[in-house]
Image (spheres, helix red, strand yellow):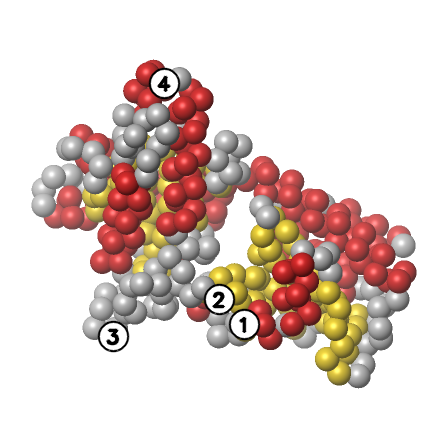
Amino acid sequence: MKPILQNLVEMTGHRDHLRLEKSVLSTLQKLSNTTEVRALEVFTDGGATHVRPRTWLQDGELVSTDSEAPSDPHREPLQNYPALCQCIEKRDIRAKASMQKGRYTLWLPVWMHDKVSTCLEITQSRPFSVHKLDVIQGIFHVYQNYQSLLDYSERDALTGLLNRKTFDEQFSRSPAASMARRARPAAPGLADEAPASCCEPPFEQWLAVMDIDHFKQVNDRFGHLYGDEVLILVANILRNSFRSHDRVFRFGGEEFVVLLRSTNLATAHKVFNRFRLAVQEYPFPQLGQVTVSIGFVSTSRGSPVEILGQADQALYHAKENGRNQVCFYDDLVASGLLTAKVANDDVELF
């Protein structure tokens, strides 16, 4: 019991989802008769649900993948795991199966925001006893509760989107250039776009800053309750407009930021304009029509501060020149409508 308690203390000391995931798998790995532990990511691609190993045991060490789920060659249809599939459909707390003699597997789905995005998988050489299941379930509950606390600290209280603090942490610690120029197939949200050919520009990551037009007038005329409702509805449209591996943030006020991953410039234009039109055509209660302005830039060049500043420049150009439009920073610079800011690795000059 003492080693388990020590592992639980270590587990709740983490402030990062992936490190927490590795920590709980390490705790489960130390239980008797355990032969394999994995964390499976559950995601939707092309209307079908898939799973892929995100963290697993390799040569006695826990390793994780940094690849994007839809392009992972190790992904499998969820239907390949009938016990887990049925468990998720029935919203059960766990599923068990024995694929072969001496190999008994237990799945524990992690429910967040009324859906499963992760599942812990434990395999051992003997059937799971009632006592063993109780111990595993107790460890899992501590893990799930702490996951929820971490998730709560990373999200905006009103809209449920990721917050500015989370953006700063994720974007600053991941060099933008390393996430760019990865040629990957399209995924949900971009499923109707044609796949890139060898002659098309390389896929990159794009950062867009979005602002609700005339939002102050909404608050002044209708009150903050209607303003909050507009923010919530726009956040819902954002969720439905982008893929699960894209990232959507609320920066505060009426400003939102999107990290659009693994696509080319033409598709980025289409996706951001499709979101803009979705907002424009949505019947907002009492208000009628609401519009948004968007500025975006590639993340393949410059520091995080510089990239965010460029997207902001494009956004403000859109707002000062008619609103309800999408502006690409490089196009504005090339046409002479914006002047590139002077910057180097140490100092950004604004």
Q: Secondary structure at mark 3?
A: loop
Report which residue position mark 4 lands on: 222
Disc 1 packing (10 Å; few <14; some 14–19; many ≥20): some
Q: Amino acid at mark 1?
A: Pro
Q: Earlier in the sequence, mark 4 or mark 3?
A: 3
Q: Earlier in the sequence, mark 4 or mark 2?
A: 2
- In the image, 87: left or right of 256? right
Rounded to the nearest angstrom, the CA distance separating label 4 from label 2 is 42 Å
Rounded to the nearest angstrom, the CA distance separating label 4 from label 3 is 52 Å
| Disc ID at residue 77 | 1
Q: Secondary structure at mark 1?
A: strand
Q: Earlier in the sequence, mark 4 or mark 1?
A: 1
Q: Secondary structure at mark 2?
A: strand
| Disc ID at residue 198 | 3
Report which residue position mark 2 lands on: 48
Q: Amino acid at mark 2?
A: Ala
